[in-house]
Amino acid sequence: MKRREISFSPPDISEAEIAEVVETLKSGWITTGPRTKLLERRLAAYIATGDNHADADDYVDRVVCLNSATAAEELALRILGIGPGDEVIVPAYTYTASASCVIHCGATVRFVDIVKDGDPLTHLPEMDYRKVEEVINERTKAIVPVDLGGIVCDYDRIYEIIEKKKELFHPTESDGTPLGELSSRIQRSIGRIAVVADSAHSLGASRTVEGRKQYCGQIADFTSFSFHAVKNFTTAEGGALTWRQISGVEDKEIYSMLQLLSLHGQNKDALSKSKRGSWEYDIIGPWYKCNMTDIMAAIGLRQLDRYPDLLERRTSIINKYDAVCDELGITHLNHHVPGMDSSNHLYLIRIPGITEEIRNEIIRKLGDEGVAANVHYKPLPMMTAYGRDCSEYPNSYDYYHNLISLPLHTKLSDEDVEYVCEILKKVAGEYC
Ligand SMILES: Cc1ncc(COP(=O)(O)O)c(C=O)c1O
């Protein structure tokens, strides 16, 4: 077989994205402006229905585009008023951004181990929900489920647990500032631990409840998405935050506060200030700078046109990988099970009976054959920033020790996919 070079996750940028970026550069407006606002409306429609052409009016005020998923999660925690003295539950098995935002806000991360071998059906490394129940206490203010690889977590179970523990929840009192007043009102209205989903991988993922599709973004109280260069849907860097309607709180209030939080607390953005005679502005709070630019949004607008086709292509690659892994007896994420449709972001495999050293050797051998592989993720407690001690999270370590992420992206030709399958059989087949 002729050698091929297969990269792990290159961006899929067509002439349409390039043309839209050029158009934006020529338009005279390159920072947050009309294209960012249009992308928010288009994403709202997509999240509402999965259909680009749907009427987005009901959802328009519930998407804010930002410069990353990290910023999106952090702003969700900030608008919820989460800070010193509060605890947030995060799976031990995730990327640092799920947890670091909690620390940025001054709150404490409570890691929870995953269930052994992940969910029995999808193999998603989901938190052990019995442990979630155990760690909830009067300081717990939020939980961050991670829809890893594009697969939707068991939100029914999460909501059941936090409803059961409702009496332990005490909303934060307002400190009298506009943000403090809104945060306190949001916490009182939600009336329980807030669900702040990390759906960095999961734009377009859905589950079906009583015959109705529910997309990521409609399930948790707040949901963050990543549009980083390696993601299914990219704006180079970028992300978005969306939320479910909260009774007694206008979507517009949340939208405006998120605008303020993302733009120095300044009550007029650059576009509004540029209108004739309209220079004066106020600074409401000494806040952050994490807005999306129209250049990024230009990429996103054209990516969104192509997104349903991109997802379909990913499904067809997954079907091919599934067949080979099943033949070799290799466990893999099950992206499409009844009642669940993944966004097909990562293809994780676990090779039974091998050590961490053998796993690393297999990754090296795949690399020698031109196939770039990866590991998603080394559990956070193993990392320096989180203490380098995974002993309390044995299932996370176990899940990680024999895990390999195969290249899954839409720049793979059919021949590339065949090549990856053949190399996997040759290299991993030796150890199966
Ligand atoms: C699970 C998870 N959450 C959050 C993020 C952060 O995304 P961003 O780079 O857009 O901030 C990532 C990025 O890879 C991720 O994998």
Image: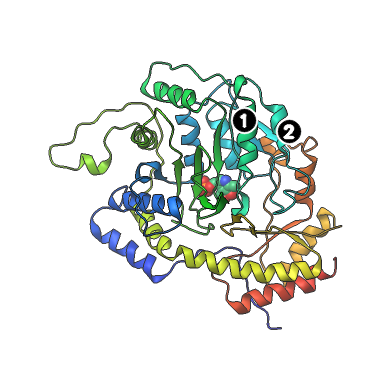
Q: Is residue 5 left or right of residue 366?
A: left
Instruction: Tell me residue 265's x, y (percent).
Output: 34, 31
> Closer to the camera, 147 or 358?
147
Quarter holding the N terminus? bottom right
Residue depicted at 32% across the width and 49% down the height:
37
Q: Which of marks 1 and 2 is in front?
A: 1
In the image, residue 343 lies at what x, y percent? 56, 57
Q: Disc 2 designates what residue?
A: 131
Vertical placement of residue 202 versus 381, above or below? below
Q: Name the residue under label 1.
A: 162
Could you tell me which secondary element the residue under label 1 belongs to? Answer: helix
The answer to which quarter of the image holds residue 259 is top left
Q: Circle 2: is it few (<14), some (14-19), or many (20+) Cα within 10 Å? A: some
Q: Image point 43% across, 46% down: which residue? A: 67
Amino acid type, callout 1: Ile
- Give the percent coordinates (x, y) of residue 63: 40, 44
Amino acid type, residue under disc 2 in the picture: Lys
